[in-house]
Image: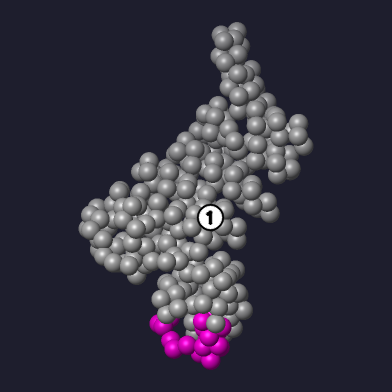
Amino acid sequence: ALVRSTYASCIALLAETALRFLEMTQFLKTDNIYLSDLESEDLDFEASVYFVSSVKRALLTNITSLCVFFGRQKANDVLLSHMITYLNDKDWMLRSAFFESIKGVGTFVGARSLEEYILPLMIQALTDPEEFVVEKVLNSLTSLADLGLFPKMKIWEIVGIVWPLMCHPNIWIRDGSVGFISSAIKHLPETDVWCIVYPLLRPFLRSDIADINEELLLENIESPIPRQVYEQAILWATKATIRSNFWKKQRESFKSGMNENEEENSEEDIAFLERLRSVGMSLDDEEKLRHMRDYLFKVSR
């Protein structure tokens, strides 16, 4: 495994070196032979990435250089399709390494692959059970937003998913959500920022702010939901039955895309809310919890 890991971490440099030799001798080779050399590189790549998780993580350290070597088409067909299989691995460190490296791959493969293949995976991973993975996803989303790679409609969509994380108990996730929102809105018209985005953020702010930037958001953000309340809420979402009105909208949306109007809490809901209050949930926390319901329900699945 150590040899395979070392080889995987060096494969991008080896590929670049091999390419230089190929270019130096290209005038001596026919086009067919040159293509066969590239095909042999594909086989070497597949052979180097054994099922051991550490080997896969080592490969990801220089994946952007490997993308440059293969070119955009093969980066899409070979590298990206192979990398996506890593997300099925139970090793959270591999998933984390995937999302840390995906920003470089995303900028290289182009807008279409980014929007159709990479972005849906990133959105899905925002509810990963390992919070360190979520933090890596937010950082990569921020980097891609800084580069202006998201169209306006996608920015709305992602902001609509990320904003409840502003009151997440994990400070890295909280800061990551603020960082993404601050970067993303720079690419929106002023009217969209104040008419669409700001009303979403306002419930999580202690006071109105004159400008939406990372510094002001962090200064005015409400305190997070207590960790114990957060964990108990996820447990509640896991155990909620059809008698629960608190989770009814999320349950039915999850199954069939239906949306129901808010209903009064059932007896089951009242009992669980009392349990949350007993572990420190305040009235403000309860309001934050209601805003985070969609996210919490997805995490509980």
Q: Secondary structure at mark 1?
A: helix
Q: Residue 163 in the image: state x and y as whole percent.
A: 40, 62
- Decide if residue 251 is in sight here: no
Q: Is the residue marked by circle 1 packed among few (<14), some (14-19), or many (20+) residues within 10 Å?
A: many
Q: Label 1, on which residue?
A: 134
Q: Residue 187 in the image: state x and y as whole percent.
A: 30, 48
Instruction: Report how many numbered discs are placed on residues in the image.
Output: 1
- Residue 158 higher or lower than 295, as above or below: above
- Decide if residue 194 is in sight here: yes
Q: How is the image coloured?
A: one colour
Which residue is at a point 57% across and 53% down the rendered structure image?
Answer: 132
Q: Is residue 159 left or right of residue 278?
A: left
Q: Toward the viewer: 251 or 81? A: 251
Which residue is at a point 42% across and 66% down the rendered structure image?
Answer: 223
- In the rendered image, the quadrant that contains the C terminus is bottom right
- The question of residue 42 being in magenta is answered with no
Which residue is at a point 59% across and 83% down the rendered structure image?
Answer: 241
- In the rendered image, the quadrant that contains the N terminus is top right
Which residue is at a point 71% across and 34% down the rendered structure image?
Answer: 5
Amino acid found under the numbered disc labelled 1: Val
Q: Toward the viewer: 221 or 76? A: 221
Instruction: Tell me which corner region of the image, top left, top right, bottom left or bottom right, holds residue 161.
Output: bottom left
Q: Is residue 276 left or right of residue 174?
A: right
- Residue 6 higher or lower than 178, as above or below: above
- The question of residue 267 being in magenta is answered with yes
Q: Residue 11 in the image: state x and y as whole percent.
A: 64, 28
Q: Residue 256 in the image: state x and y as whole percent.
A: 51, 74
Magenta residues, as a range?
257-277
Q: Toward the viewer: 145 or 261? A: 145
Q: Is residue 216 left or right of residue 53?
A: left
